[in-house]
Amino acid sequence: MPVADGALSVADARLPGVNDFSDSRSAAVDQRARWAGLRGPGVPPRPLDARALAALAANPGCGRRAVLDAAGVDKGAVARALGSPERFGQSQFAFARGNAFEARVKADGCAELLRLLGAAESETAEVPDLTAAGPEGRAARTGLALREATAAKRWTLLDHPLLVLDVAGAPVYLEPDAVAVRPDGGWTVIEVKSFPILDGAADPVKVGAAARQAAVYVLALERLDATAPRPDVLLVCPKDFSNAPTAELVDVRRQLAVTRRQLARMTKVERIAATLPEGTTFDVTRERPPGELAEAVEAVPATYAPECLASCELAYHCRDRARERGAVEALGRSVRGELGTLTTVERVLAAAYGDRDGRVGDGHEDDPAAVALRRAAALRTEALGREASCP
């Protein structure tokens, strides 16, 4: 039927829900094309995992990691191409020891794990079979098992369930060590680690990393039920120097808040990507002029901290660049926070001792950090002078 004069066709009209969906789908396609361009032609995206998402939460201000992770760039390959390969990783011995410890914790129908959760000696736990075809099938089977266990109101332990978390519009599959469903319907994430708890205390850096990783799993569980996941996760580790398991409940509410903000921020990293020069790519599969890859990496702003060395493949490259600039970030976040507007080592030394011409600071004479530095430098000089004068 012809369209009457003055009427709008469906193609021209701004119909709510129709054109909005078309526009959002078109934007999603454009964004995927942009990410593919950053990776390089034919380069498949590197999938994210819980460790990568936890590392993002550990340094939420780093735009470089956010963009490269959102695009699925292999940061390890980029670091090797730049001549600054990562130097961290788990040894085969530590990997085997961790697997052996986890097997002990889950032996005999997870009886030891049930005891660590606080169940009575007479109680047993159901351990459902989560086998299914493909990641989508395993994730669906996990969701079904969680719902059935919650309705049954009895102890249930899900061994290596598969969870799904939406990150920047794409599904990320996550596999915690275990999830316990309590008789009251609460869900507890269980993280089994091979580092020891000595005299009731563990390495705070390792505990923090485990808490951030567990927070990612809690967020994925909240996708299935917003109220069932508990904010305290069970961290299971060897006790002292033995292989006997012990456990502590770790509150991850702070890590949850940080991770939520970071994941929300990842949906906006296209704004950072949009500011990159035309044709920017991190492709390492083809021959490129010397320095081109380094220029592409430097085009994305980074926020380096020494903690990055334990979790980011590009950390050694970023540390070298920070040292070349004389940036105080290379000395640590706490030092950077104390120095305020003094952002380079050169400015710090000028504030403490004066520049080559004997002038103090660079307009920072009244800066509290500069005053404290001058006082500390004077005390150091005085102490060294006294030491030199001692017989």
Image: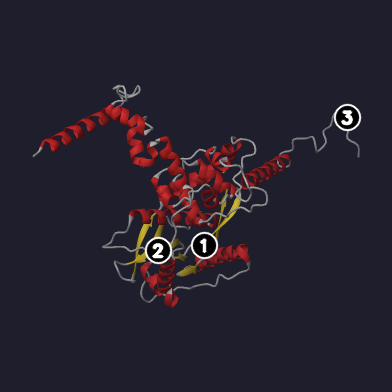
Q: Amino acid at mark 1?
A: Glu
Whether pointer 2 and pointer 3 mark residues with C-beta atoms closer than 8 Å, the reply is no
- Give the residue at mark 1: 175
Cα distance, mark 2 to mark 1? 14 Å
| Residue extending furthest toward the right | 1
* Disc nearest the viewer among 2 and 1: 2
Query: Which one is earlier in the sequence, the residue at label 3 or at label 1?
Result: 3
Quarter of the figure with residue 334: top left
Q: Is residue 85 above or below residue 354?
A: below
Q: Position of residue 76 (x, y in %)?
A: 52, 52
Colour scheme employed for the rendering of this structure: secondary structure
How many neighbours does mark 1 have within 10 angstroms: few (below 14), some (14-19), or many (20 or more)?
Answer: some
* Disc nearest the viewer among 2 and 3: 2
Cα distance, mark 3 to mark 1? 60 Å
Q: Amino acid at mark 3?
A: Asp
Going by the image, does 80 lie left or right of 6? left
- Give the residue at mark 3: 5
Q: Position of residue 375 (x, y in %)?
A: 22, 30
Query: Which one is earlier in the sequence, the residue at label 2 or at label 1?
Result: 1
Q: Is residue 337 above or below residue 173?
A: above
Q: Is residue 146 above or below residue 277?
A: below
- Give the residue at mark 2: 193
- Residue at the spot x=45%, y=47% of the render? 316
